[in-house]
């Protein structure tokens, strides 16, 4: 284990010292919202069913797909970073052991993608605040539960923000939409 990894493990240990049975239950519940992207799929379905938020839901679908491609299929496999719980023997995990790479945090990336889209597209201050708090709590839960390093979570947040911006760019840029439509037509 290198010095940087030791430093990050130290941060996780400090966070882990805050654990209580009630906080454990809360953090597991928060992190479970991101499992299988259930919360984000629910956002898409709910927003898709409203006239006011239908465009935002379409941008969310783009963001969702970009996360699958960029984070889950590309970055996690390219970096294949070992998870922090694999470095420490005496950590009792509160969630099932994950087998994919640690870098970047997918939960955090999805959370910040959706927060970014909502922040820029929603008129509702309440939805913005709710999603912002949810994104921060999901990111913190990944550290608390010892399944990600701090740099995984920071990278996930930055990548999520970038994917959110890119999703809006793709949706609102007529030239990009036209090129994508032409690609689909040429394949048929």
Image: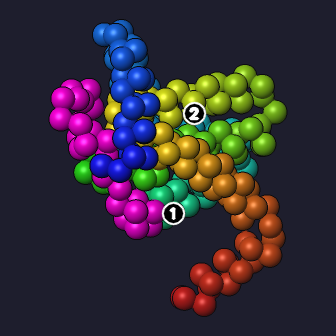
**Residue at 43% across, 53% down:** 103
In this rendering, would 144 be left or right of 92?
A: right
> Visible in this render: residue 44?
no
**Dot 2 lies on which element?**
helix
Q: Residue 122's spot in the image, x, y percent?
A: 77, 37
Query: Answer yes or no: do the residues labelled 1 and 2 have beta carbons within 8 Å?
Result: no
> Visible in this render: residue 91?
yes
Task: Choose top left, top right, bottom left or bottom right for residue 97.
Answer: top left
Count of numbered circles on the image: 2
**Residue at 26% across, 26% down:** 94
The vertical placement of 102 against 124, above or below, is below
The vertical placement of 70 against 8, above or below, is below
Q: Residue 165's spot in the image, x, y percent?
A: 72, 54
**Dot 1 lies on which element?**
helix
Region rendered in magenta: 73-97
Task: Say which mark, if any, is on residue 135.
Answer: 2
In this rendering, would 82 be left or right of 129?
A: left
Q: Which residue is mark 1?
A: 70
| Disc 2 packing (10 Å; few <14; some 14–19; many ≥20) | many
The vertical placement of 20 against 9, above or below, is above
**Residue at 39% across, 32% down:** 10
Image quadrant containing the C terminus:
bottom right
Task: Choose top left, top right, bottom left or bottom right for residue 43.
Answer: top right
Q: Residue 2's spot in the image, x, y percent?
A: 35, 50
Q: Residue 144's spot in the image, x, y percent?
A: 40, 27
**Residue at 37% across, 41% down:** 6
Mark 1 or mark 2, earlier in chain? 1
Q: Most prominent secondary structure in the magenta stretch?
A: loop
In this rendering, would 92 be left or right of 57?
A: left
Please tell me which residue lies in front, 118 or 177: 118
Considering every residue shown, the one lying at the far left of the view is 89
């Amino acid at each position: 284990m290198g010095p940087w990894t030791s430093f990050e493990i130290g941060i996780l240990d400090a966070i882990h010292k805050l654990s209580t049975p009630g906080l454990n239950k809360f953090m597991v519940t928060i992190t479970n919202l991101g499992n299988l992207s259930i919360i984000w799929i629910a956002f898409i379905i709910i927003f898709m069913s409203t006239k006011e938020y239908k465009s935002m839901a379409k941008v969310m679908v783009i963001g969702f797909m970009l996360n699958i491609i960029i984070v889950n299929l590309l970055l996690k496999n390219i970096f294949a970073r070992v998870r922090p719980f694999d470095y420490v023997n005496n950590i009792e995990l509160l969630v099932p052991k994950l087998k994919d790479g640690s870098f970047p945090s997918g939960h955090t990336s999805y959370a910040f993608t959706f927060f970014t889209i909502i922040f820029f597209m929603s008129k509702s201050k309440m939805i913005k605040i709710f999603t912002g708090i949810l994104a921060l709590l999901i990111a913190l839960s990944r550290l608390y539960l010892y399944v990600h390093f701090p740099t995984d979570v920071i990278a996930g947040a930055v990548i999520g923000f970038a994917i959110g911006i890119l999703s809006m760019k793709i949706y609102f840029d007529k030239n990009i939409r036209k090129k994508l439509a032409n690609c689909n037509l040429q394949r048929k």
